[in-house]
Amino acid sequence: MTLCLLVAAIPAASALAPVDITQTDDTLQLGPYLEYLKDPDRREDLAEVRASNELFTPHTGDVLNIGYTSAGHWVRFRLTNTGTEPQTRYLEFRSAFVDRLTLYHPQERTGYGKTESGRLVTPPERPHPSRHFVFPITLSPGADAVYYLYADSADTLTIPLYLHTDTGLQQTVLTSRSWLSFFQGLIAAMAVFSLFLLVTLRDRVYGYYIGVIIMHQGLFFTLFNGLGYQYFGLENPWWSREALSILVSLTMLMIMQFTRVLLDTRNQQPRLDRVIAAIQCAAIAIAGLSLFVDYYLSIRLANLHGSVTALAVWVVGWNALRKDHPAARYFLIAWTSLIVGGLTYSLKSWGLLPSNAFTEHSWQIGAAIEAIFLSLAIADRITNESRQRIRLQYEAQQAQATALEIQRRANETLEKSVRERTEELREANRKLQQLSDTDQLTGISNRRSLERYLQHTFERALVDRKPVAVLLIDIDHFKPVNDTYGHQAGDDCLKEIAERIRSSVASEPVNTRAGPLGLTISMGVYAAAPVKGDSAENFLQKAHQALYRSKHEGRDRVTPFR
């Protein structure tokens, strides 16, 4: 039986170009050395496959890309060891989206042995501890063997195979860990900083941003990179497969909600906002269905929904940029970076771009750039709002200053008006007082003014102990003047005499409208320094008595009180 198996293996060996593992670099991409065979019925029968060697198709590219398929696929490759020592290599299947992998490796006496891996195999049961699927291979000196690998998946299927030495594998793992550590550290820092801003500023947009980071850059990429077991101890295969479709849908839901709040689509783009709301409802529905329907269907729905979301959110960002929304520029850069990163990873997976450190981690790089620029978008939004508040405060201060200036001017005008009105009232009161204290005929102070002035003068003289003189004047024989010439002529006499003293009245006739009239006057005088018990009325009475004496003694004279 052993001889038959060896003879049967010779045609296959001769049909494949051998890879001498002693002549290869630390890492070799096996894509150009593969042959593949489609297995529509998923028979997984190595004997039948080996009997169909002539049906294998050579592959010349770096990565064998199958795409979405319900069939299983076989690949085979041939390794030789021309050295004198046993050689150990590590076969790496560098894709997390494969359900089952079975490596059939030749054995000297038992034909072929098999080793299983894939995401439906729990991490402790895999042949080598790694986030990707790694199979150790050992070749004896002079060995020449053909290896068969069976793969099937409910996801899109690509077969990226690499052959490493121990050093090459360590270098690959180190490079991968470095990229992932940088990515995870950046995302963790952004999440913590955003949480601090959320607590400090209490702006809900930071809450949605944290949700995007946790859901997308955190949980999704942790499972996407096959780190669920390493970080969370998630051995159940459900976390390696079914959870992805749920997380994709919930991530799209959170991204769309963040977009709606950040770009204010409800007010700025109401029509697209309704479209986004409908897409959000679809995300919830797909996430719910993913719990019950087969993963083969749920992941396709989730991927289609993710593509629609990417397009819708990009259109929203572009429209916001056209409307000069302050956060749109950074938002559009962030979202475009994620799309380009995901597209680059897809093209690498499809074998249209070379596999290297950049393309292997392009999706995470795009996600990291997205996280950074989304934070800048939020910062720009808050800065713009702060500037707007400052501008509004400045405008309010200017308006208040203007109002105060108007009030000040109004007060000045009012005060001026009040002063003017007060002065007018004072002048009017002065004139009124003057009219009240002035005799209308003669234009001199009347009896009331005289009494008030006399009382004031008397009181001061009493304090200062100074003499006061009171003079009473009467026009001699004035009644005949009124009776003869009329009261108007008498009024003229009063007006004229009110401007003279006794001697001038006697020496010159008084001019009246009836002609010059000769008149005389009589005076009574009382002068003394007031003492306690005196009054202004007493002084006035004594001056009156002196006047009567002047009139009694012949008029045209001044008589002091004795």
Image (tube, helix red, strand yellow):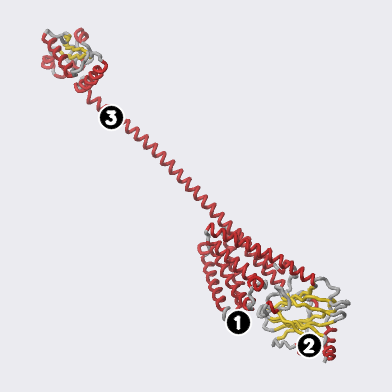
Q: Secondary structure at mark 3?
A: helix
- The answer to whether residue 258 of the structure is visible from this angle is yes
Q: Amino acid at mark 1?
A: Asp
Q: Amino acid at mark 3?
A: Ala
Cα separation between marks 3 and 1: 105 Å
Q: Which residue is mark 2?
A: 50
Give the quadrant of residue 236. Answer: bottom right
Give the quadrant of residue 175. Answer: bottom right
The mark total stands at 3
- Judged left or right of residue 411, residue 268 is right
Quadrant showing the C terminus: top left
**Which numbered disc flags the more N-terminal residue, 3 or 1?**
1
Name the spot of residue 324 as percent of width and height, x first: 57, 58
Q: Secondary structure at mark 2?
A: helix
The answer to whether mark 3 and mark 2 are in CB contact below 8 A is no
Q: Which residue is mark 3?
A: 428
- The answer to whether residue 262 of the structure is visible from this angle is no
Task: Pick the residue in front: 366 or 118.
Answer: 118
Mark nearest the camera among 3 and 1 is 1
Determine whether 556 is above or below 127 in the image: above
Name the spot of residue 304 as percent of width and height, x first: 61, 75
Q: Which residue is mark 1?
A: 294
